Amino acid sequence: MTVPVAFLQAYYSLVYFATLGTCDKVFYGSQRIFGFDLHQMTKNFLITGAARGIGRGLSRLLLQRGHSVFLIDNSKTELEHTSDYLAQNFSSSKYSVALCDICEPLQIKSAIEKAAKFFNGHLDVLINNAAYTGAVGSAPFAELSLEMWNKSIQTNLTGAMLMSQGCLPMLRKGAGRQRGGCIIHMSSTRALQSEPNSEGYAATKAGLIGLTHAMACSLAGDSIAVNVILPGWIHVANECKDGGAWEDLLSKEDHRWHFSNRVGKVEDILRAVEYLADAEFVTGTEMVVDGGVTRKMVYPEV
Ligand SMILES: NC(=O)c1ccc[n+]([C@@H]2O[C@H](COP(=O)([O-])OP(=O)(O)OC[C@H]3O[C@@H](n4cnc5c(N)ncnc54)[C@H](O)[C@@H]3O)[C@@H](O)[C@H]2O)c1
């Protein structure tokens, strides 16, 4: 049967918007609607640091949109909490989890093998989101320990590099696939600006920008796009085991600090991810998602 392209586009838009904010068991139970295979429009995502915070929010929202998600994290408690939530809201055919410390190459290997089985060898988007943030403001630079410095490098930079290397076979273009997948690194506006005593974090987040253009160059032949998102303040108080409401702990001043007049949400990062996942002509570059704060001139109070 030949179906006009315009009809298909209208139909898929309808399904996409109809499912926003809903759970997949309602709409995606069969994976087929009116004879069309929804897998053709949905993607396979692998997200590190997905048990809490931005990674958890992205996983939840992508699943709501019908995508499949493989979640990696090294926090057993948070991963169990998130798994319980997912089990209540989504079909187990759409997601899987792996407890994995991305500082440990053998654990990475085993998690990627599990993901390859789950995705049947086809990955569309790898999001290197996990980070060690504990070093921010924790000790004066003069007392920064080698242990803390190395933990930042291993988690934020080496972990992202190893995850990317390990996922290449699942991302490359090949038989039945004209385009490769894409890799998104999660940096920070702290790659560009600093508070005191955040050397390990700032250096690794800036390092991800270099890693991005180097990998984009090296992987162009495989048709794999590599980009980096620099989030500003993304409030994720609601995305963890002991979390409350999103508004918790936010003041009017916090919102007013931003050109956008509000603090960032996981949904803001989702929009960047969705754009990059489909942007054929965008690779090797950085996308700042910060409500304008890095463009804000700040003078001393008088
Ligand atoms: N939230 C923000 O305002 C903000 C701003 C700028 C950048 N970012 C970046 O976004 C990403 C997510 O931030 P978040 O606020 O959700 O952080 P978060 O601390 O809430 O979550 C990070 C997750 O990564 C996991 N993780 C840490 N080390 C790991 C390891 N070795 N192996 C596997 N998993 C590990 C943690 O268990 C946690 O679930 C990070 O890369 C962070 O640097 C966040």
Image (cartoon, rainbow, N blue to C red):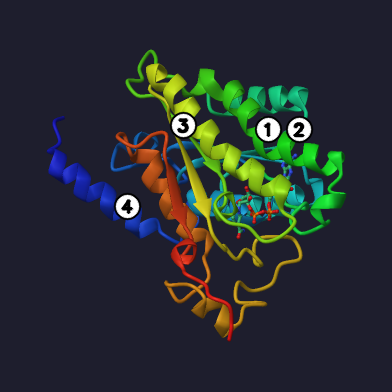
Q: Disc 1 marks which amino acid?
A: Gly
User: Circle 1 is placed at which residue position?
Assistant: 159
Q: Nearer the viewer, mark 4 or mark 1?
A: 1
How far is disc 1 from disc 2 in space, using C-alphas? 6 Å
Q: Position of residue 189 (x, y in %)?
A: 55, 54
Q: Earlier in the sequence, mark 3 or mark 4?
A: 4
How far is disc 2 from disc 4 in space, using C-alphas? 40 Å
Counting other residues with Cα less than 10 Å from the Cα at mark 1, is it few (<14), some (14-19), or many (20 or more)? many
User: Circle 3 is placed at which residue position?
Assistant: 213
Q: Earlier in the sequence, mark 2 or mark 4?
A: 4
Q: Disc 3 marks which amino acid?
A: His
Counting other residues with Cα less than 10 Å from the Cα at mark 2, is it few (<14), some (14-19), or many (20 or more)? many
How far is disc 4 from disc 1 in space, using C-alphas? 37 Å
Q: Nearer the viewer, mark 1 or mark 3?
A: 3
Q: Position of residue 198 (x, y in %)?
A: 72, 53
Q: Earlier in the sequence, mark 3 or mark 2?
A: 2
Q: Disc 4 marks which amino acid?
A: Val
Q: Is mark 1 within 8 Å of ligand 1?
A: yes
Residue plotted at (32% across, 20% down): 178
Q: Disc 2 marks which amino acid?
A: Cys
User: Circle 4 is placed at which residue position?
Assistant: 15
